[in-house]
Amino acid sequence: MGNPKAFLTIPRKEAGYRPVSDRVRDYGEVEQTLNPEDRRLQASRCMECGVPFCHWNCPLGNRQSEWQDRLYKNDIKGAYALLIATDDFPEFTGRVCPAGCEKGCVLNKQHEPVTIRENEAAIVERAYNEGYVYPRVPKRRTGKKVAVIGSGPSGLACANQLNQKGHSVTVFEKNESVGGLLRFGIPDFKLNKSVIDRRIDLLKEEGIEFKTGVLVGTDVKADDLLRDYDAVCVAIGAEVPRNLNVEGRELDGIHFALEFLQQQNRVNAGVEVPRDERISAKGKHVLVIGGGDTGSDCVGTANRQGALSVTQIEIMPKPPVGENPDTPWPNMPLILKTSSSHLEGCERRWLLDTRKFIGKDGKVDEVEIEEVNWEKDPSTGKMNLIRTGKIERLSAQLVLLAMGFTNPVAEGLLEQLGVEKDARGNVKVNASQQSSVEKVFAAGDAATGASLVARCIASGRNAAKGIDKFLKTK
C-alpha cells in the first residue's frame, strides 16, 4: 500500500465530459481523461480495506485494490496483468460498466469513492500505448473444436478463454462486424468502435477464427455444428424487445430503441442507408419510453441528430436522489442516475403510462399518456398500478420504445438445438452453464436475460470453464 493516508488528503477527481456544445456535434467519446500524475493520485486514494467490498460488488471479482496500488506505483505492466487475470476486456468495462465496485467502495459512505472505473480505463490505455498488450498465442493445441455463436461480450470472453486453453475456436456472428451489442447497441459516444477493432485484431492474431454475416440456424444448421464441433456455446443475447401493444402502434415513426441505435452506429461506420429507411430525429419532438440506459442512449443519439426536443418517460416512480434506504451501502443503490446524455438536453418524467399513439397522415404525431401511482397490497406485498385518470397529450413525431428485452430469439437456432428453456424463455443451464443438450452450453444474456457487460463477460468465462472441463472428459 503506497500511501495509506491519501484518502484523507486527496479528494475524488473525475475526468468529466467534453463540453456539451462540442460533443453533441459529433459521435466521439464524451469522457475526457486525467493526466498520468492526477490518475496516480486518484489511485492512491484506495484504502486497501480489510474487507474490499469493491471486489465483492464486481461480477468479475476484479482485484481493484491490487491494481490501484500498481497504478499508484506507476507499474502499468503489473496493473494490466492483474486486470486481465479476471477481466478479458477492461477497455470495454472501463468505459460502459455502471461501476458497482465504486458503489461498494468504503469511501462511498461519504460519496467520495475511488475513481475505479476511470482508473481501469486509464490502465488499459497506457498498457496498449506502452506495449504491454500483445498477442498471447497458445503454445499447444488440444485438437478440440468449439463453435461460439454470437460475438458480444459473453461470446468473446468464452472464445478468448477457450483459445488460451489451446482449443480451436470459431466465432459465428450474424452481423457484418464483430462485437454484438458492444458494436451495434452502445453508441459511439460511449464506446468508440476502434476500441473493439483493436481487441478483435488481437484475438485473431491469437488464433480465433471469426465468421461474420453468418446466421446460425439459417445459413448454418444446428445439426452441422453439432457434427463438426466438439462443443457449442450459445451467446446470442436476449434480442426480443419488450413491445407496447396499444392503439396506434402500427403508425410510422414508432421504433424499438435498438433499431434506432443500430442504424446510427452503422451510418457512423460508413454504411449507406437509403433515405426512406433512415430513422431520424432531426426537426422532431422525440419521445423515449423507458427510463434505463438504453433510453438514455436514445436521448444522446436523438440530440446529435438534431431533435427539436427529447422527452423520456417511465412508468415507475422517480428513484431517490443520492441515497436510498432500501438499497444501503455496500449494495448497488437504486437511485436517480443522470447520464451524460441527459445533461445534453432532455425532459425526464416518471409515473406515466402510455395509453395510445395518435397519428397524422399515417405517421405518429402525438402520444396520449396517463399519470399513475403504485400502491403496495398489504396482504401480498405486491405493488399494484393505480390509474389516476389524469390524461395529457405529448407532441411526438418519433417514438422510441426502450423498455428492455425479454429473452433470446427462440426461432431458428434454439429450436433446432432442442435445448430446454426456463420460464422466461432463456436457455436453461446448470452451474457449468451446460444446457439440456450435452454438447451445448449457453452464456450471457441468452442464459440470464438482459444484463450488464461485466456480468456477460463473467458468464462467458464461466461457460468456458464448463466447456473446457467437458472437453477433457471426451
Image (cartoon, rainbow, N blue to C red):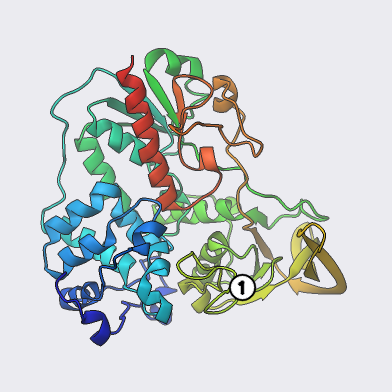
Q: Residue at left 65%, top 74%?
A: 318
Residue 454 falls left or right of residue 132: right
**10 Å crowding of disc 1: few (<14), some (14-19), many (20+):** some
Q: Residue 441: give x, y in percent of width and height.
A: 45, 28
Can residue 192 be seen in the rendering of this structure?
no
Decide: is 239 above or below 234.
Answer: below
Residue nearest the viewer, comparing 108 with 257: 108
Q: Residue 120: give x, y in percent of width and height.
A: 27, 62
Q: Which amino acid does label 1 sit on?
A: Pro
Q: Residue at left 52%, top 56%?
A: 261
Q: Residue 276: give x, y in percent of width and height.
A: 60, 52
Q: Residue 116: give x, y in percent of width and height.
A: 31, 67
Single out the residue that lies furthest toward the bottom: 9
Give the residue at mark 1: 319
Residue 208 falls left or right of residue 420: left
Q: Residue at left 37%, top 71%?
A: 30
Single out the residue that lies furthest toward the right: 389
Look at the image and tell me in which quarter the N terminus lies: bottom left
